[in-house]
Amino acid sequence: MDAALVVALFRHFTATMALFGASFFAAVLAPASLAPALAPLLRRLVPPLALLAFASALAWLVFVARDM
């Protein structure tokens, strides 16, 4: 495995775990009284994480296809 693939995998798993964790916390674990305070934070946090997850998935695809 080359370094670029490892970096792409690391970024992908980091972004997807952060995206899942933030969404799961807001939907299931956070008390209802905290929802108004979390909404602006999630609106600011989720789109960049989703974009990073998508971009790293594409990079992962390119690096794996290159090695075939």
Image (cartoon, helix red, strand yellow):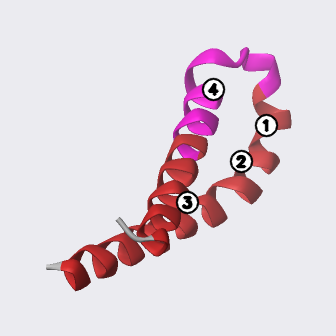
4 or 3: tag closer to the N-terminus:
3
The alpha-carbon separation of the residues under discs 4 and 1 comes to: 10 Å
Q: Secondary structure at mark 1?
A: helix
Residue shown at 56%/53% (left/top)? Answer: 15
Amino acid type at image mark 4:
Phe
Residue shown at 55%/60% (left/top)? Answer: 11
Question: CB under 8 Å between callouts 2 and 1?
Answer: yes
| Above or below, 2 relative to 10 | below
Q: Secondary structure at mark 4?
A: helix
Q: Which mark is residue 22?
A: none
Amino acid type at image mark 2:
Leu
- Quarter where residue 44 is shown: bottom right
4 or 2: tag closer to the N-terminus:
4
Which quadrant of the rendered structure holds the N terminus?
A: bottom left
Mark toward the viewer: 4 or 1: 4
Q: What residue is shown with label 1?
A: 38
Question: CB under 8 Å between callouts 3 and 1?
Answer: no
Question: CB under 8 Å between callouts 4 and 2?
Answer: no
Q: What residue is shown with label 2?
A: 42
Which quadrant of the rendered structure holds the C terminus?
A: bottom left
Mark toward the viewer: 3 or 2: 3
The alpha-carbon separation of the residues under discs 3 and 2 comes to: 19 Å
The alpha-carbon separation of the residues under discs 4 and 2 comes to: 11 Å
Spot occupied by residue 33 in the image (x, y as percentages of width and height): 81, 18
Amino acid type at image mark 3:
Arg
3 or 1: tag closer to the N-terminus:
3
Q: What residue is shown with label 4?
A: 25
Judge by depth and name the residue closer to the eye, 36 or 67.
Answer: 67
Mark toward the viewer: 4 or 3: 3
Q: Which residues are magenta?
A: 19-34
Question: CB under 8 Å between callouts 3 and 2?
Answer: no
The furthest residue to the left: 68
